[in-house]
Amino acid sequence: ETGVTQSPTHLIKTRGQQVTLRCSSQSGHNTVSWYQQALGQGPQFIFQYYREEENGRGNFPPRFSGLQFPNYSSELNVNALELDDSALYLCASSLSGTLISYEQYFGPGTRLTVT
Amino acid sequence: SQKIEQNSEALNIQEGKTATLTCNYTNYSPAYLQWYRQDPGRGPVFLLLIRENEKEKRKERLKVTFDTTLKQSLFHITASQPADSATYLCALGTGGFKTIFGAGTRLFVKA
């Protein structure tokens, strides 16, 4: 176990609705990255947060947004859900700054189904 | 365009043999490359990281090579066990915020 937790485990939403997914980082880690993983594919980078600021973004529309809190936990918000948003959403914590480490520690993921 | 390719076909090997998985990339200049293991319905687990100036890295039964000329990494599991059965993902990083993952290769180790 990595110490990274995500909630909820599973979620079913209807097209057009909004969803918030949550992640608690591993102790001592200050950076959180979010990924979307479709079935049979590798994780696709959504964005990264460092010191409560978005540090970089992948090729995802603005309806995907996030937050990082002072305790380094994080949220992923998706508005106007589409059927193609159905996927496993993963958060990964890592350490940035002076003691940067590129190793990422993933949570178990949230399985989102949009109907 | 940038691309990472891992063998999409599953790899089936006999217990005790060495499994070798391949990761090829184009139009990237990665600062490092990582390998992760992923079991069904779970998040990836970090295994090894190798930097662009390193040729080989080992950890217990695992070995990774990195050839920046061929734009290829090989991942070896020696003395494979049924418990090694999983999907293995390679991931490239350029030293910034973004990590790019391949689609992964499924490994089945038969007893």
Image: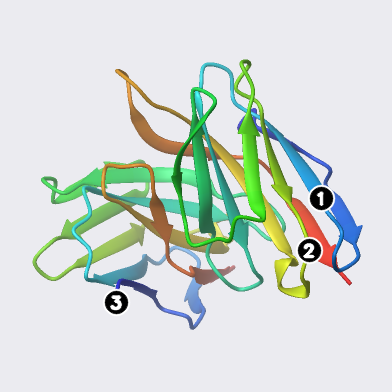
Q: Amino acid at mark 3?
A: Ser
**Depth check: A60 or B91 in front?**
A60
Residue at mark 1: A19
- Using the image, name the chain to which the residue with label 3 belongs: B
Secondary element type, mark 2: loop
Q: Position of residue A97 (x, y in %)?
A: 34, 21
Secondary element type, mark 1: strand
Residue at mark 3: B1
How packed mark 1 is, by other alpha carbons closer than 10 Å (few <14, some 14-19, many 20 or more), is: some
**Depth check: A26 or A89 in front?**
A89
Which quadrant of the rendered structure holds the C terminus of chain B? Answer: bottom right
How packed mark 2 is, by other alpha carbons closer than 10 Å (few <14, some 14-19, many 20 or more), is: many
Q: Are marks 2 and 1 on the same chain?
A: yes
How packed mark 3 is, by other alpha carbons closer than 10 Å (few <14, some 14-19, many 20 or more), is: few
What is the quadrant of residue B78 in the picture? bottom left
Residue at mark 2: A81
